[in-house]
Each structure stands twice: as structure tokens, then as C-alpha cells.
Image: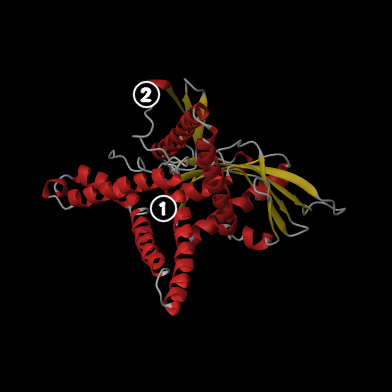
Amino acid sequence: MQGEPGAAFSFSPKNPDTAMLEKLEGVENRYNQIEERLADPAVLSDQEAYQKYAREHSELSRVVPVYRDYKKVMADLAESRELLRDSDLEMRAMAREDVDRLEARKTELEESLKLLLLPRDLNDDKNVLLEIRAGTGGEEAALFGAELFRMYCRYAEERRWKVEILSEHQATAGGIKEVIALVQGKGAYSVLKFESGTHRVQRVPATEAQGRIHTSAVTVAVLPEAEEVDIEIDPSDLRIDVFRSQGCGGQHVNTTDSAVRITHLPTNLVVSCQDEKSQHKNKAKAMKVLRARLYDQELQRQQDEISESRKIQVGSGDRSGRIRTYNFPQGRVTDHRIGLTLYKLEQIMEGQIQGLADALNTFYQAKALEAAGSS
């Protein structure tokens, strides 16, 4: 086994009993090795090495306790099957009950282990950059964009995640033309990555005199936060322009050239930030967004080069596709990827999206297992 976290998490479903058990034995052996190294004074004195092993230990800790439970169930099952041959009828009846119970538990643990052994998206534990933009629908789309952002903020609050607005362009009627926010919290990307795509809203706008239902759209992009170690940017590839920040209606936020626009010349990506009064802070925020977008581009390029099963496993897909419809007159939310409709729109708009997140996660896990089984 190699030292990289997640390297052990794959298996061949062609011969699941043999292949999976061999892989699990390797995982447990590696786990035992790491526990020894974490107790080694030489490793304890080397912070870099210690953190590396600690991360891998944490990753393997998801699997090893389940595997040990599985081994115990298998041992108990073998013992109970032996008792089925006992001459005592009462003993055989008790053994039959134990066998039925342990067989059910064995199946349950095998399914859990298959999921645990699937390759993990290495970005799942990262913070995310959440980008929301009003699409078709004008002011109504901008208003819904603001409501979607509030929904995600409420959900983040429930999870005790921190939300920091990096850039925001408000619409005149109180909506949001565009907002980019950093969401910081354990597992943020693993949940929010399923939110990327076009969100459609159907409702009667407040300005509609005849009560007609309008359809508007908002696009959401969820990018894993990229650190400098994830993506290297050559300063010579950047053109940095400064300009005077402006607010709604052309009113100046301040009278200095504090706003920053950064153009990445090789890709022609442009990022601007003007929310802070400090040019230095605006540049730092713009670089954070640029780094995440470049990292996301690289991820997309890599995913295009690998198998469809891997794409499914990391939950990638066409971001331009309509993923969800929020129908206010009927009080329903429909996720078109999994055909799920929930008649609890009000609760969902208050940030109660965990049910959707769980259903999507289950769906993509099933797809990943199906893809692994046919590969």
C-alpha cells in the first residue's frame, strides 16, 4: 500500500468476495502500520510526516472498524452454522435465528464496505467557492438569486459553516445579479457540489398585475477552493488593472482606485473584486476566485480524459443543464437528475436542503457502484 490517503479505496467487483477481502486486508495492514508510525518518536518530531500519517489514519479509520465488525460477524456466522448440526432441536432453532440475523448483518456490512472502498473525490473535504448569477428573467431572476443565496447561507449556518462574501453585484430591486462567496466548513464541497447547474423558478412576480406565472433561471457554480499548492499561477501570466469602485446607480464606494481586475492571459479568465476599500484585500479575494476557477478547469480537463464511471463518482455533469425547478404556486421542488419531487418548498427555501443532498448522494453512489460492477 502506498502512503497517499485514498489510494487503498478501490476494488474489482468481478470477484467481490476475494478481491474485496484482499483489499480490506491490505487496508487493515496499512492502518496498523500507520498506528505504529504515529507512535514513533521520530515521526512525532517531524510535523510534516506526522500530519501526513494522521490524515491517512483518519481516512482509513472510515473503513477499518467496519471491516473488523464484518470479520467478527463472519466468525460468529461460522460458529452458528456449526450449531445447525447439533442433535438438540432447541439448540438448532436458536442457531437458525442467529444465522438469519447474522446473514442480514453480513449483507448490510458488505454493502457499506463496497461504498467505503469506492474512490473518494479528493476535493470532498475542501471549502467551496459558491457563485450565483441571475439568468433569464431580469429582476425576477435577480430576486430569486438572492433567495437561493439566503437558502445556502441558512443551510451553512445549520452546519456551523462560515460564509464570506468575496464579490457581490446587487440589482436595483433588491435582488442579486451575481454573488461569489467562500463557504468554509468540513465536507462543504461533498454536499454543495451537487448544487452546480441551472435552477429554474416558476411563480407570479410581485409586479405581475394579471397573475401570470413567469419562469426565470439562476445559475449556480460550486468550485472547490484551491490553495497555492493545488494550482500554481505564474505572475507573468497575469494582467492586473485597478479602477475606482462603484456601487448601484454609479455612486462611488470610495474615491480611490481600490477595485481590482485580474486577467489570466493564457485562458483569458477575468476576475474582478471591488467590495473592499483596500486594493490589497480586493486583489487577494480576486486571486482566490481566479485560483478556484483555474483549478476547476484543470479538474474538468482531467475528468474528460478518464472513464465515465469516475465522472459519475465525483458527481460531475453538465453545469449548463437544468437541474432543479422551484414551483411556488404548487409549493414543490423537483430535482430533474433523480426525478425527486418534494412538496416542501417553504422549508427548502429556509435552508432545509439536507434531504435533497442525501438523495443525490445516494443516487450517485448507486451509479458509481453500477459503473464499478460493469467495468
In the picture as drawn, the residue positioned furthest to the right comes out as 210
Numbered mark located on residue 234 in the image:
2
As drawn, is 277 to the left or to the right of 207? Answer: left
Q: Is residue 125 at least partly visible in the picture? A: no
In depth, the one of 269 and 126 nearer the eye is: 126
In the image, what residue occupies the spot 41% across and 38% down? Answer: 226
Near mark 1 (Cα within 10 A), the count class, few <14, some 14-19 or many ≥20, is: some
* Residue that lies at the very extreme toward the front in this rendered image: 87
Q: Which residue is mark 1?
A: 186
* Amino acid type, residue under disc 2 in the picture: Asp
Compare marks 1 and 2 and give the one earlier in the sequence. Answer: 1
Please provide percent x and percent y for residue 292. 45, 36
State whether residue 65 is above or below residue 283. Answer: below
Between 255 and 288, the one lying in front of the other is 288
Helix or strand or loop: what does disc 1 sit on? Answer: loop
Picture disc at residue 369: none
